[in-house]
Amino acid sequence: MLKGISPILSPELLKTLCEMGHSDTIVIADGNFPAESMGKNAKVIRMDGLGVPVILEAILGVFPLDQYVDRPVSLMERVPGDNADVSIWNIYEDMINKADPRGSKVIQKLERFAFYEEAKKAYAIIATTETSQYANVILQKGCVL
């Protein structure tokens, strides 16, 4: 155990976050996301039994968002005509507001297939058992100043 670091951040995940360099990305994926097929060139870390919000909050406690881009946080945009509940985005906005002085304006929404293309470039993908739809998040790493 380490002081000041969430116990859900496993040694494997902490090592991965530390290995990532400026502008590398990590996906925190919901349970429906095709993590293994999207992550063929990435590290895939399973975090079964956990939802995206608890993992996002823990990561934001140790992970600087890229300060050199306007939108270092990406969400998967809801497909037109799909009226799935996306209230989880409000939770993300609250967390981002607390973690980054720029607030929720650092968040962008990417069309589903554009999100997949970005996910394929990620350094790592965290596969969760989150049941909310459109709960996927991509974070772009910044520099520790």
Image (cartoon, helix red, strand yellow):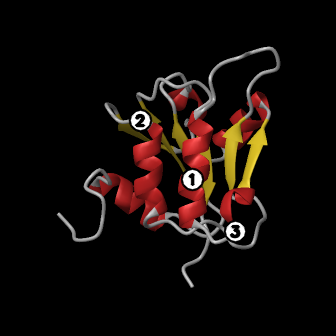
Label 3, on which residue?
A: 102
Callout 3 amino acid: Arg
Quadrant (top left/top right/bottom left/bottom right) for the C terminus: bottom right
Q: Residue at x 61, y 50 (%)?
A: 93
Callout 2 amino acid: Gly
Of callouts 1 and 2, the N-terminal one: 2
As drawn, the label of residue 94 is: 1
Label 2, on which residue?
A: 51
Mark 2 residue element: loop
In space, the residues marked 2 and 3 are separated at their CA atoms by 25 Å
Callout 1 amino acid: Asp
- Residue 136 shows in this picture: no
Question: Which tag is nearer the camera, tag 2 or tag 3?
Answer: 3
Check whether the beta carbons of the residues at disc 1 and disc 2 lie within 8 A of each other: no
Closer to the camera in the image, 100 or 72: 100
Q: Residue at x 72, y 59 (%)?
A: 106
Left or right: residue 57 compared with residue 78: left
Left or right: residue 88 compared with residue 15: right
The relative height of residue 141 versus residue 38 in the rendered view (above or below) is below
Mark 3 neighbour class, 10 Å CA radius: few under 14, some 14 to 19, many 20 or more: some
